[in-house]
Structure formats: C-alpha cells, structure tokens
Image: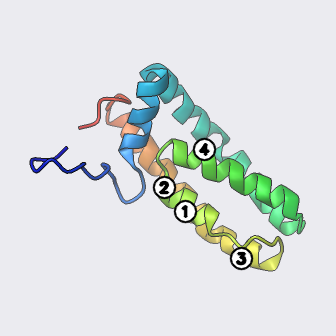
Amino acid sequence: MDAHGWPEAPRTTAVLRTDALDALAADVGAGEAELFARRYLALLEQRLGNLRLAAEAADVTRLREAVLSLQTTSAMVGAEALAGTVGALPPAAGAMATESLAEVEVAAAVTTGALVARASAAVPVGASA
C-alpha cells in the first residue's frame, strides 16, 4: 500500500515485472524461484525454436502449444512484454505467424538481457526493493 492506502503498482522495468519472481519466491522459496528463472533462460531458445517450427510447418496445434508454453512461463518470471508479444501472435500458423516471430525474438533477447542483468546485480529473488 502506498501512503494513501492504495495498492502500489507492480515494480517494473520496461521488460520485467520484478514482483512476479518475488511472488513466485513467496510461494516456493527464493532458491526454487531462482532455479525456475535459470531454467526458463536455458529453455528459451528451445521454446522459440518450437514456435518457429510450428509456424513454418503451418501446424496450428503445435503453434498453440508453443505459444501457451512460452507465454505462460514468460508470465511466471515476469517477462510481461514477451508474454504479451507471444500472446498477440496470429492464431493461424503460416506466413503471418512466421513474420511476427521477429518481434518475439527481439522481445526474447531483451528479456534475456534483463534477467541476466538482474541476476548479475545480485538482487536475490524475493528481495527486490
């Protein structure tokens, strides 16, 4: 709550909602939340590859699964910009989805940088100010 008793806005950077990892840490512990963030980064390229393959193959079912996987895990680590970009992909596979993947890849690169910077800044999950 702020000084007026209103709920405070989530702490954000242009890319990350830092309170998302803090909430995860409150649920499962700081160590597990940090492990989740590291695994998220380790699997990000694979998830992007799955997304690209599904779009290029025009496989609507695989595209939905890839979108849901990347969108959900991104939201869990606070990567709201990436989650939103993925969620905005056209529901049909094919050329339009493939063209939109460039935006997703840029958002993923920026997200990776932000998460690595957060880890490098030695701000433990659950201890953001």
Compute the Cα span from label 1 to label 3.
16 Å
Residue 43 in view in this figure: yes
User: Which secondary structure, mark 3?
Assistant: helix
Q: Are marks 4 and 3 in contact (CB under 8 Å)?
A: no
Q: Which residue is mark 1?
A: 84
User: Is residue 12 placed above or below 55 in the rendered structure?
Assistant: above
Task: Write the residue at 59% across / 70% down.
Answer: 103
Q: Which badge, 4 or 3, is on the more N-terminal residue?
A: 4
**The N terminus: image quadrant:** top left
Q: How is the image coloured?
A: rainbow
Q: Amino acid under label 1?
A: Gly
Q: Which badge, 1 or 3, is on the more N-terminal residue?
A: 1
Q: Amino acid under label 2?
A: Glu
Which numbered circle lies on residue 73? 4
Which numbered circle lies on residue 13? none
Q: Which residue is mark 3?
A: 99
User: Is residue 33 placed above or below 72 in the rendered structure?
Assistant: above
Q: Are marks 2 and 1 in contact (CB under 8 Å)?
A: yes
User: Which secondary structure, mark 1?
Assistant: helix
**The C terminus: image quadrant:** top left
Crowdedness near tag 3: few (<14), some (14–19) or many (≥20) residues, C-alpha within 10 Å: some
Compute the Cα span from label 2 to label 1.
6 Å
Q: Nearer the viewer, residue 43 or 10?
A: 10
Q: Amino acid under label 3?
A: Glu
Task: Write the residue at 72% across / 73% down.
Answer: 90
In the image, is 53 to the left or to the right of 99? right
Q: Which residue is mark 2?
A: 80
Crowdedness near tag 2: few (<14), some (14–19) or many (≥20) residues, C-alpha within 10 Å: many
